Every structure is written in C-alpha cells, then in structure tokens.
Image (spheres, rainbow, N blue to C red):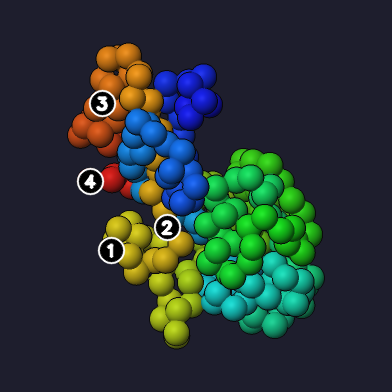
Amino acid sequence: RVVTGRAHIGMMSRELTAREQQDLGDIRHVAVAVDAVVGVVSQEIYDAGVRSISREALAGIYRGQIDNWQRLGGPDRQIISVDENLYHGTRKIFSAYIGMNSTMESSATVVLDSMDDIVRLIRSSDQAIGYVGYGYLGQGVKALSLDIEGRKVAATPANIAGGAYPLSRKLYLLVSGKAPPWVQDFLQFILSPEGQQIAREAGFLSIK
C-alpha cells in the first residue's frame, strides 16, 4: 500500500528482495527494532529432555522426516509440527534457516495464521513444536536453544544483538517520501530513547 501510494507508512518484518528495492523509489526502509524467531515446545516436552535442537532436526521435522520425540531425546510421542501461513515474514525467516523454499507448503501437521494461536496450541499440547517471535516467549511455552556445531545458543538479548543467535531479523517501517510531517515525527519518536523503550516493553530489542 505504501508503494502504490495508498498509505503513508507500513510495516515489514523481513529484508527487501532485489525487485522490491528497485520498486521503492523515494520510500524509506527504516529499521526500528530487532526480533528473533524461536522454536518453542510445551513445558512437558521441555521437562522430558528436549531443550535444544539443531538446524538439521528442525528441517527433518518440517519435512516430515522426523515424527517422534524419542529420536530427539524426548518421550515416545508423535511430533505435532506447527507452521505459519506462507505470507508471514516469520515463516520466511524460519524457512530460510532450515533450507526450505518459503513459498512451498511444509509437511507441518498444523498451519495457523497467528502467533497467538500457535502459543495457545503449544502451551496446551504435550506433542507440539512451533516457532514464534521473541516477544511471545514467557507465555507458557518454553524456548529451545539452537544446537550449532555442539554449542547450545539460546535466544538471549546478548546472543541476538551480537549475532551468535542466527534466527534474528530487523523490523522495518516503510515511509513514503510524500508523507506529511506528522508521519516523519512519528518515525523520529520510534527511534528516540522513549520509543525504543516502548519497543523493548513490547518484547523486541532496541535497534540502537
């Protein structure tokens, strides 16, 4: 809508494609916060021993090649894999990490349209795995560390900001060059210390 002139400001949770960069014209692409994508399970699966997971294991689950928690050190239960719909930026980040084409359907057991629904399903299940944005942690789901060449890398603020946790992304605003002054003022507020504090309270990391 910003590109077509129907809106002054829009949001984007992924990087621009080369084609999109060409189409921007005078539209500004401004990073305003940092987020991470985190694999999550229920407290029951976490307590059963599944506390970290490798890229290869995630790929195996979402390709339908790993279907029982016992193969990952957990209980003898079928894995219910939860995915997001194709158009979500979070899904594009996750798909790229596990080496899947983000425009193709995965072999997930359940596909949902919102992270709130994913959190509710994971929280109430003793079989499910899914992924959510960093701000959704602490809502009754347990975050899995990433097993990277034998190292357990948790989605902590330090690891995300320092680049050790690879499933991270910047959050952007697209601002039309023809936007009125109050839109520019709004952007400056978001980038101010007060605005960045609000971003942190919302569960994101400061772009600063």
Quarter holding residue 193: top left
User: How far across and down, in percent of the image, does residue 59 sit?
Assistant: 64, 72
Q: CA distance from mark 3 to mark 1?
A: 25 Å
Query: Residue 175 — which label?
Result: none
Residue 40 visible in the snapshot: no
User: How far across and down, in percent of the image, does residue 201 sit?
Assistant: 35, 37
Q: CA distance from mark 2 to mark 4?
A: 15 Å
Compared to 133, does 195 lie above or below? Answer: above
Say which label, 3 or 1, has the lower sequence index.
1
Q: CA distance from mark 4 to mark 3?
A: 13 Å
- Residue at the far left in the pictured view: 193
Give amino acid for label 1.
Gly
Query: Residue 189 — which label?
Result: 3
Give amino acid for label 3.
Phe
Say which residue label 2 marks: 168
Q: CA distance from mark 4 to mark 1?
A: 12 Å
Give amino acid for label 4.
Lys
Say which label, 2 or 3, has the lower sequence index.
2
